Image (tube, rainbow, N blue to C red):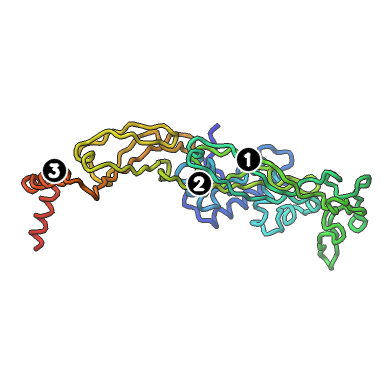
Amino acid sequence: MKKEDFYNILGLKRDASQDEIKRSYRKMALKYHPDKNPGDKKAENIFKSAAEAYEVLSDPEKRRRYDQFGHEGLKGVESRGFGNFEDIFDAFGDIFGGGGSIFEEFFGGGTRAKTARRGASLRCDILLDFEEVAKGAEKTIEITKRSVCEECRGTGARKGTSPVTCPYCKGKGEIHQRQGFFTLRTTCPKCKGNGRIIETPCDRCNGQGLCPKKSKIKVSVPAGIEEGTRLRISGQGESGENGAHPGDLYCDIHIRPHSIFKRHDCDIICEFPITFTQAALGCNIDVPTVSGKYVNVEVPAGIQSGDTLSVKGEGFPSVRGYGKGSLLVHIVVEIPTKLTPRQEELLREFSELEHKNVTPKRKSFFKKLKEYL
């Protein structure tokens, strides 16, 4: 199914400013908020679509790629992903001026006061070889992250006991205080908003419900990925409190320099040295590729040092899912530094012929020089 244009979703022109984007998203989020439209699936879908559009258009780099390539340009780019409403509240609650959730400021907040905090997101680095970039790779990384305590199963209470309802707020997670005509709502200082307290903490996690644990995670890296790209692995961050959603794992991609090849976008550059006679007479050369095989390339007679020959389809695949780059063979004509007597004799004969038959470029240069002087 073709995805709807992000600008159309937010009712914006393509030259909209960041303030206009923010105002439009805020207006739509309030209009289609699930608390205002209970049970309305259409409103829920619009609410999620607006959040997805705002995430891209509010980020200058993502917006640039979207403007240039459309939805295809966002493949392989770091994205939050919104599996549920809580993901949206965590990501964009700040634009409503509240403390992280727009329930609190616009819809009373009581139902969200006890919401457990989502797990922290983590970051790691992944180092790839050129060959892995060409064909894609599956890397296994080992990280230490806070996971649900196996002793108390995340409750924070000692085995055989359970958390109890907070007697101070009666399990609401907040307290109300009247001051004249106003009612002030604040987080319960006893249970810190959880609505429950732990009387006998777990010995292993000290009542936190989470413990450090080493984990091995497999990360699929798409072929053609670029240096500095950040991959998001949903749900592989630290565990959340009291069963809340886990955080995400962000993997920053780095590519190890190659001894022969260099990269330019999807193209691979190979600097190939040839002799003076090969350049003058023409030849065929076997050029290595990143896949390990060789391709035969015809070098035309009279090629100049610095010229480039292109071999289509031997570059990196596009992360956007279509086409491959080229292998660019950068020709370097190598001048000999030591000559045998016979080589020197032949070159002197050649030099005499050169003076009698001046090449077009030299002829043009001397003509310009004469006019200049």
Residue carrying label 3 = 346
Mark 2 or 3: the one toward you: 3
Under circle 1, the secondary element is strand
Amino acid bearing label 3: Leu
Taking the image as shown, residue 3 lies to the left or right of residue 115, namely: left
Q: How many marks?
A: 3
Query: Foreground: 366 or 26?
Result: 366
Dot 3 alpha-carbon crowd within 10 angstroms: few under 14, some 14 to 19, many 20 or more: few
Query: Foreground: 48 or 235?
Result: 235
Amino acid bearing label 2: Ile
Under circle 3, the secondary element is helix
Picture layout, residue 14 above or below residue 293: below
Mark 1 or 3: the one toward you: 3
Residue carrying label 2 = 255
Under circle 2, the secondary element is strand
Q: Indicate which disc residue 140 carries.
A: 1
Amino acid bearing label 1: Thr
